[in-house]
Image: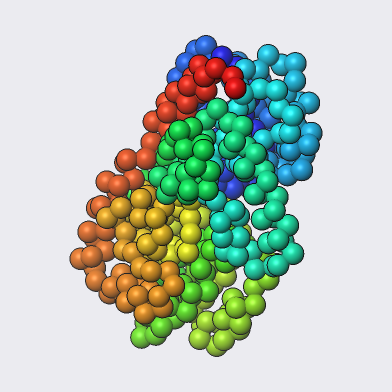
Amino acid sequence: MRVAIDARTIVPRKSGIGNYVDALVRELLTLDDSLELTLLCHPQSRGLVVEHPRAERVIFPGETKSLSTVFRMGGALAGRGIELYHSPADLVPLGLRLPWVVTLHDLMWVEQPALASAFLPERWANAAWYRWNIGRAVRGARRVITITEATRTAAARVYPAAASKLRTIRHGVDHQRYYPGAGGPRAALAGLVPDGKRYSLIVGQGSPYKNHAGMVRAFLEATADEPEHLLVLVRRFSRIDTEMSRLLSSRRARDKLITIPFVSDAALLTLYAHAHALLFASHLEGFGMPALEALALGTPVLASTTPALREVTGQAALHAVSTDHADLVRQLRRLSKDEALREQLRRRGLEQAQQFQWRRAAEQTLACYREALAQAPG
């Protein structure tokens, strides 16, 4: 069986989708000696994509969620003996003459585009693009992988005719990287966080669904009597960020917040490991990998009640309603001041994280490939 996978998200600054593809490919190649992969790689991926005698690498420019995927990739896949194509993120080429499997991470651009972008031209254009492309990918797919039951429920609601094709396959976590005691010493953060200062952590892009402004406001109120408790915000800022810009300009925020647009993977791991807590009260998530990684490290997590985060964190995190300021403040105070609760969350987090294994995800994905190929066309 030869399967093509779009691996162009494996680049020096990998996204969550890049980590997913990288882990999946590595595990798939250990499962079945008859499995051969054609990996479509970004020009900047040299030295990053796994080298294996059963993995052919084909350089193809452009991003995974781009015009080149839809309008040009079909030609790159032709004539290579490929039996199945796996899109790891929503889009498939037009005119693809192969059966395919597509992974859906969430349906935010389809159902709630206002949470994806505050910039109206971008919101309108991307909502139209994704509604067309995701609908086309789901309707034509032999199987659709959803990364949580929450995403499966959303996909069945939006595309009821495809319900029988949906398969929930949850991500894993790299337990060789994320474990208690991982990460460098606290002294390694000297250039980022002042020595001796306790800090909580927020990580993620600047889209509205991440609710960063809501968490910053709640943190400032909840820790008003803890001047030594800082908030580190590792965040890619979005095009329109009026609310956050206003927040960060206040004196109280300047005294308590440290904003960092990008850190290396090693520095991020150390930030996770030494954080008092990870704050991850998003309005919507398809999965919530930062929360799972924090649990695997033994770092307490404040998550929202959105279904995917409930599913991933279970009873191992505190939960607050993302739109309820008072609830966020109340749970932040509990997390900050109740050491017995924090210890309980640490223990539960380590147990919860063990449920998420990349090998299991790869086994289920391989089974999905076989189902797709066994299905008669039409």
Q: In x, y percent, where is residue 339?
A: 24, 68
Residue ranking furthest to the left: 340
Q: Residue at x 64, y 64 (%)?
A: 117
**Residue 234 vertical placement versus 151 (above, below):** below
**Residue 372 vertical placement versus 119 (above, below):** above
Q: Quadrant of residue 95?
A: top right
Say which of 139 and 263 sits in front.
Answer: 139
Q: Is residue 20 visible?
A: no
**Residue 8 vertical placement versus 265 (above, below):** above
Give left or right: position of 288 versus 123. left
Give left or right: position of 149 versus 75. left
Q: Residue at x 74, y 64 (%)?
A: 121
Say which of 32 and 155 sits in front.
Answer: 155
Quadrant assignment for the N terminus: top right
Say which of 162 and 51 sits in front.
Answer: 162
Q: In x, y percent, where is residue 352?
A: 30, 47
Quadrant assignment for the C terminus: top right
Say which of 303 and 220 sits in front.
Answer: 303
Residue ranking furthest to the top: 34
Q: Residue at x 60, y 55 (%)?
A: 109
Q: Quadrant of residue 90?
A: top right
Q: In x, y percent, where is residue 33?
A: 50, 12
Q: Residue at x 70, y 53 (%)?
A: 128
Q: In x, y percent, where is residue 351?
A: 27, 46
Q: How is the image coloured?
A: rainbow
